[in-house]
Amino acid sequence: MAKSEQLDLDQVDYQLLKELSADGRASDVWLGEKINLSSTAVARRRKGLEERGAVVSYSADLNMPLLGYSVVVFVAIELSSQTDRALNEFEREVVKCPSISYCGFVSGDTDFLIMLHVESFEDYDRVYRRELSTLPNVAKIRSSFVMREVARRGVPPIVFQDKE
């Protein structure tokens, strides 16, 4: 959504969004106590935020290492062509790859940036051979392994800065 298309939100909306971004399962009663509103008012505001598109979905933040996926890999993909046909073919196939957590079309000398969670370096080799190397129109694949996670946020704190 472009800056000119931003939703008109008040201070209470931002307080509610901040609490929901920290815990999407929070009850209306708990949220009401936290932001000083009745649970009915919270429910009405939450529903309005959902209907207006400010809240897209609710999900669980999984502990990937505990599930066996302890290696995070960022993969930069450069295509051999940037025609609409080549981009569309790549995008159509990349969404079929079961190991990919995120893929974005980016600016610069890389065309796409992909994030993977894999079990091990050997598992990445499997993903590379069976998924990444079979994608259409790929000219170059560059991989970077995350050595240590420094920060991970679903919503950056600046979104709520000076809004409360």
Image (tube, rainbow, N blue to C red):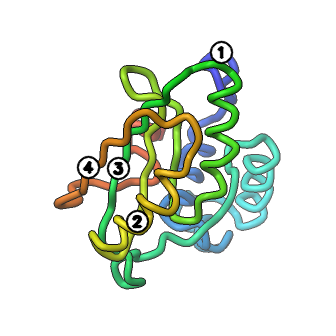
At label 2, the amino acid type is His
Q: Which mark is residue 144?
A: 4
Say which of 89 and 36 sits in front: 89
Residue 70 versus residue 148 in the image, above or below:
below
Q: Nearer the viewer, mark 3 or mark 1?
A: 3
Residue 6 versus residue 155 in the image, above or below:
above
Earlier sequence position, callout 1 versus callout 2: 1
| Residue at (46% x, 53% y) in the render | 154
In contact (CB < 8 Å): disc 1 and disc 2: no
Q: Secondary structure at mark 1?
A: helix
At label 4, the amino acid type is Ser
Residue 22 spot, x, y in % from top left: 48, 62
Q: CA distance from mark 1 to mark 2?
A: 36 Å
Q: Nearer the viewer, mark 4 or mark 1?
A: 4
At label 1, the amino acid type is Ser
Q: Residues within 10 Å of mark 2 (few under 14, many from 20)?
A: many
Q: CA distance from mark 4 to mark 2?
A: 12 Å
- Report the residue marked by disc 1: 4
- Report the residue marked by disc 2: 117
Residue 140 spot, x, y in % from top left: 38, 36
In contact (CB < 8 Å): disc 4 and disc 1: no
Q: Nearer the viewer, mark 1 or mark 2?
A: 2
Tally of numbered tags = 4
- Report the residue marked by disc 3: 74
Q: Secondary structure at mark 2?
A: strand
Q: CA distance from mark 3 to mark 1?
A: 32 Å
Q: Secondary structure at mark 4?
A: strand
| Residue at (34% x, 78% y) in the render | 65
In contact (CB < 8 Å): disc 4 and disc 3: yes
Say which of 3 and 127 sits in front: 127
